[in-house]
Image (tube, helix red, strand yellow):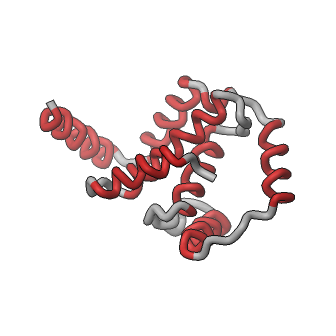
Amino acid sequence: MPEKKTVERAREDAREGKAPSTQAGEFVREEIEHVREGKHGVRSTKQAIAIGLSKARRAGVKLPPPAKGKTSERTRAQAQRDTERSQHKRAVSPKRSRAVKTALKREGKEAASPSALSRQAHASAQRRGASSRKQAARKAARTRTAGA
């Protein structure tokens, strides 16, 4: 269950017309914080991001499932279920919830370190094309000057 302030920040982003990925970023940030403060651990940085995205979808962020070929069919199906879950609120099984939390508690916290996040971001950027990265950099430069 995401914290109230996270949901509120995501809603604020939606009101401001920001992209769904930006709204989902709030949930990912929350998840990284949870790992850092020792609420639970994660096996990898990717897992922390995946948990955050799942929470975002369940909270109603209109985030599309990953494109075909980008991830496994299983991941796409899970993303679809998370999206459907946002329409029909159902009580979470306490037994399953406890089991998941216990399993995550056994994992480490290193995956949420600044260096691990940096490595993940760098690897993710490398998978995109050069023109895509250039376009993102140009957009960042535009928003920097617009915001100043």
Q: Which image quarter is the C terminus in?
A: top left
Quick check: 89 above or below 128? below
Left or right position of 125 against 82: left
Left or right position of 78 against 23: right
Residue 130 location, x and y as percent? 32, 43
Residue 51 location, x and y as percent? 62, 50
Quick check: 110 above or below 94? above
Q: Residue at x 48, y 51 (%)?
A: 7
Quick check: 75 above or below 142? below
Of all residues shown, which one is farthest toward the front?
A: 4
Q: Residue at x 58, y 50 (%)?
A: 2
Is residue 50 something one can see in this rendering?
Answer: no
Q: Residue at x 82, y 59 (%)?
A: 94
Q: Residue at x 65, y 28 (%)?
A: 37
Quick check: 91 above or below 119? below
Residue 82 picture quarter: bottom right
Q: Nearer the viewer, residue 64 or 17?
A: 17
Left or right position of 33 against 93: left
Residue 135 location, x and y as percent? 24, 46
Residue 39 location, x and y as percent? 71, 35
Q: Nearer the viewer, residue 120 or 94?
A: 94
Left or right position of 21 against 132: right
